[in-house]
Image (cartoon, rainbow, N blue to C red):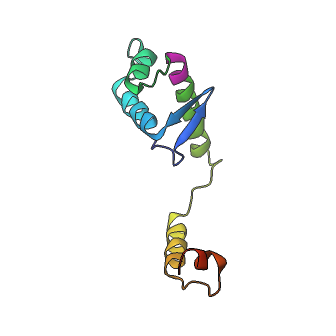
Amino acid sequence: MASSSRSTRSSGSSSWTAKQNKLFEKALAVYDKDTPDRWQNVAKAVGGNKSAEEVKQHYDILIQDLNYIESGQVPIPNYASAAAAAAAAATAPPVAGSALMRNKGF
């Protein structure tokens, strides 16, 4: 799974940065389910004083998220529409008299 668009994700009492999530994903590719001491190895690769228990809990949440997505319980975003809306907003002329625009010097 790709990194979450959120910069951090709470897993129990600890937060996970985007960098830690990326290290976590890479470590999962290196240490598969047959690796002895898998969670200790993943925790060491992630760093940030993550324990093997925290890493395993984070993995369990990842699997739960994937199961929701694959079962159709999470709608697939329409990125094309979002991109079109963002492009339209970026090229729209400013609203005359807007207080925000005056404060920004437009």
Please identify the quarter of the rendering in which residue 25 is found.
top left
* Residue stretch rendered in magenta on the structure: 52-56
Please state the total of marks drawn on the protein image.
0
Return the x and y of residue 31 as percentages of the image width and height. Answer: 37, 23
Residue 95: say if magenta. Answer: no
Q: Looking at the image, which residue sits at the far top?
A: 36
The main secondary structure of the magenta stretch is helix
In the rendered image, the residue lying farthest to the left is 30
Task: Give the quarter of the image for residue 103.
Answer: bottom right
Nearest to the observer: residue 89 or residue 101: 101
In the foreground, 11 or 14: 14
Give the residue drawn at x 33%, y 26%.
30
Q: Residue at x 44, y 33 (%)?
A: 20
Q: Residue 9, image x and y in percent?
A: 57, 38
Which x, y percent locates residue 19?
42, 38
Q: Quadrant of residue 69?
A: top right
Left or right of 10? Residue 80 is left
Magenta segment includes 53: yes
Residue 37 horizontal side relative to residue 13, left or right: left
Q: Say if 23 sits above or below 2 in the image.
A: above
